[in-house]
Image: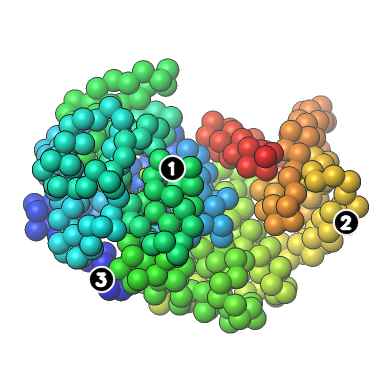
């Protein structure tokens, strides 16, 4: 089954079960300052779950475009390293707003996977929250799932959209890609490897988390589910990695042609194929590359992709040429992509031309610093100089460092940033002309959920 057919089969199945098919919302959340980008199918229904908004249906289904490149759910650092994480992906979902609850949600999911899609039960593994006897009974006694492929977990089985908002215990379904792939079942030591891949999360929405952490009950128990289209497509196409599915093969081929790298399994090509989707869809939805906030996250994604192109030996603009391949793959499902194609290409090309001016020089500085390095940590002043003079976002520098088995001193970088800020405060707002590179505001923007979450994650990733 092609990705497009799976998407359609999902929507058709849930429509036949009384769900209204709702189009994907924008990647830029409407009226939700707690959210950087749309990160799940439930985002557009947040106020319905909270009882603040009424719709003329109580069951909905959608295929939602999502970006997880910052904030609570951030997979930027995983891209290229796992078989299953993207910055942009599509989340298939079914939702109940005070209509059905655990029993039906579980039955629908099981029926769709083992009935409509015909997946063998022996390949599926189910988890529930440690406290959730009700869901455990439904799975084991009513659906007849084997206790040998079932576990109860704690944090992994409690889902929340962000630090505040709707949340609840969840039940997840995993697909076993077989003994040839390293990794253990959910809850085991190696469960983060890619043998057992989580395909579907059924969230039993029961609470609204308050800023002080308190869990307030929702007006009515509800259901929110999410299944990654690319992950289920890999299962249905008999391949292990998301990058082997139809859609990604086409993008990888286009990227291979544009960069001159022939090895479709090359990590850098995967990063580029991933990033062209998030960058294009973000621009399509109105985000403009800039030095702060959402635009800065977009710029970071683009610059990462350009650096990977540079690594493959391409120093001419190439990234913007990939939009055509993306439109060929996804334009039918997303007509807005077709409409915005020219604007997306122009925006990306502009970013490529701008960064090309400093990318080469910056890489030389970085190579020299690495060559002369004592120990395995790149000092904060180097990270800062690259950022300040060459427009290298710190996560880009960290990406290079990680490839060489090095860590970066993010605390040292922060100290340099603070000194820079103090200087700017002392000398007035117009002290520096940053027209061509990142301003000092850029990493302080989104301090609530972008800078802290992101940089803490970078620090923790590269510190150990
Ligand atoms: P994982 O544990 O693999 O990181 P998750 O638990 O963070 O996934 P959820 O928040 O439960 O994911 O999202 C629901 C579903 O969306 C997942 O079961 C998965 O199929 C899909 N999904 C989540 N993150 C990604 C991603 N970065 N790229 C592709 N698909 C994803
Ligand atoms: Mg995750
Ligand atoms: Mg998970
Ligand atoms: Mg999950």
Asked if residue 184 shows in the view, the reply is: yes
Q: How is the image coloured?
A: rainbow
Q: Is residue 414 left or right of residue 131?
A: right
Q: Residue at 23% across / 63% down in the picture?
A: 119
Q: Within 10 angstroms of label 2, few (less than 14), some, or many (20 or more) residues?
A: few
Contact check, label 2 and label 3, Cβ < 8 Å: no
Q: Residue at 80% across / 58% down in the picture?
A: 362
Q: Which residue, given by chain and number where applicable, does mark 3 sit on?
A: 5
Give the camera-side residue of 413 and 442: 413
Q: Of circles 3 and 1, which is in front?
A: 1
The answer to which of marks 1 and 2 sits earlier in the sequence is: 1
Q: Which residue, given by chain and number where applicable, does mark 1 sit on?
A: 188
Image vertical order of residue 140 relative to residue 234, above or below: above
**Image location of residue 220, percent across then percent down:** 17, 29
Q: Is residue 342 left or right of residue 412?
A: left
Image vertical order of residue 301 relative to residue 151, above or below: below
Contact check, label 1 and label 2, Cβ < 8 Å: no
Q: Which SS class for mark 3?
A: helix
**Image location of residue 217, percent across then percent down:** 24, 22
Q: Within 10 angstroms of label 1, few (less than 14), some, or many (20 or more) residues?
A: few
Q: Residue at 22% across / 57% down in the picture?
A: 121
The answer to which of marks 3 and 1 sits earlier in the sequence is: 3
The answer for how far apart the CA atoms under marks 2 and 3 are is 50 Å
């Amino acid at each position: 089954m092609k990705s497009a057919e799976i998407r359609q089969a999902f929507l058709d199945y849930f429509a036949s079960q009384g769900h209204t098919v709702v189009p994907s919302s924008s990647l830029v959340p409407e009226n939700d300052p707690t959210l950087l980008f749309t990160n799940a199918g439930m985002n557009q229904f947040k106020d319905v779950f909270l009882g603040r908004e009424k719709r003329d249906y109580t069951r909905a289904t959608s295929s939602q475009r999502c970006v997880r490149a910052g904030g609570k759910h951030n997979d930027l650092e995983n891209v290229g390293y796992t078989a299953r994480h993207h910055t942009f992906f599509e989340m298939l979902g079914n939702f109940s707003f005070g209509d059905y609850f655990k029993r039906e949600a579980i039955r629908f999911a099981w029926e769709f996977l083992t009935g409509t899609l015909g997946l063998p039960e022996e390949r599926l593994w189910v988890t529930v929250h440690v406290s959730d006897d009700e869901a455990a009974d439904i799975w084991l006694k009513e659906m007849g799932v084997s206790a040998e492929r079932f576990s109860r977990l704690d944090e992994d089985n409690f889902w929340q959209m962000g630090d505040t908002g709707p949340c609840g215990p969840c039940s997840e379904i995993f697909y076993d890609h077989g003994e040839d792939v390293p990794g253990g079942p959910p809850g085991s030591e190696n469960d983060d490897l890619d043998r057992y891949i989580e395909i579907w999360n059924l969230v039993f929405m029961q609470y609204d988390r308050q800023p002080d952490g308190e869990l307030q009950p929702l007006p009515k128990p509800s259901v929110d589910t999410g299944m990654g289209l690319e992950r289920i497509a890999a299962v249905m196409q008999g391949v292990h990695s998301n990058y082997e599915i139809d859609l990604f093969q086409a993008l990888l081929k286009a990227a291979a042609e544009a960069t001159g790298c022939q090895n479709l399994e090359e990590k850098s090509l995967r990063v580029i194929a991933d990033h062209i989707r998030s960058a294009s869809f973000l621009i399509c939805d109105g985000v403009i590359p800039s030095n702060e906030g959402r635009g800065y996250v977009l710029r970071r994604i683009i610059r990462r992709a350009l650096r990977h192109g540079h690594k493959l030996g391409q120093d001419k603009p190439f990234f913007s040429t990939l939009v055509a391949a993306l439109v060929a793959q996804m334009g039918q499902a997303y007509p807005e992509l077709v409409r915005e194609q020219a604007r997306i290409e122009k925006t990306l090309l502009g970013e490529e031309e701008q960064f090309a001016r400093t990318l080469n020089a910056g890489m030389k500085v970085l190579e020299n610093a690495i060559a002369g390095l004592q120990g395995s940590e790149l000092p904060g002043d180097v990270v800062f100089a690259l950022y300040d003079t060459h427009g290298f976002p710190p996560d880009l520098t960290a990406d290079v460092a990680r490839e060489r088995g090095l860590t970066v001193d993010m605390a040292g970088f922060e100290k340099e940033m603070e000194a820079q800020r103090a200087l700017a405060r002392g000398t007035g707002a117009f002290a520096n002309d940053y027209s061509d590179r990142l301003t000092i505001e850029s990493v302080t923007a989104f301090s609530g959920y972008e800078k802290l979450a992101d940089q803490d994650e970078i620090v923790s990733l590269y510190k150990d």
